Amino acid sequence: VAGDFNININSNPSNRMSRLIDSLNYEQLINSPTHFTERSSSLIDLMLIKHSTQILSSFVADPFVPNLVRFIMIN
């Protein structure tokens, strides 16, 4: 199961989402932040798996915007 859950899993390890993951015997594959703002980062994009031994590699790629800067387009 993968997706943008909009729940910062790192902020509170005993939150409802973490308990749900545990109750289903899933494991969160990604452990580093996946969402960045100018002042913070969070882990909201989750990859939940049942058998971690079958995963060869996983990682969070570097942000494609330099220096984690947000841009606003104005017409």
Image (spheres, grey):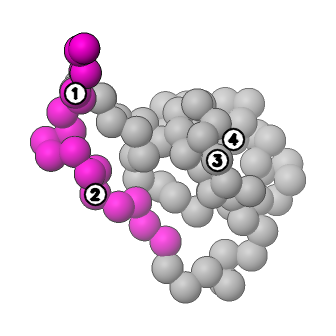
Q: Residues within 10 Å of mark 1 (few under 14, many from 20)?
A: few
Q: Residues within 10 Å of mark 4 (few under 14, many from 20)?
A: some
State which region is magenta. Answer: 58-75
Quadrant where the image shows the N terminus: bottom right
The circle on residue 62 is 2
Residue at position x 40%, y 39% in the image:
35
Residue 63 colored in magenta in the image: yes
Residue 70 colored in magenta in the image: yes
Which residue in the structure is indicated by mark 1? 71
The circle on residue 3 is 3
Tell me the CA gap for discs 2 and 1: 17 Å
Which residue in the structure is indicated by mark 4? 18
Tell me the CA gap for discs 1 and 3: 24 Å
Tell me the CA gap for discs 4 and 1: 32 Å
Q: Nearer the viewer, residue 73 or 64?
A: 73
As drawn, is 11 to the left or to the right of 50? left
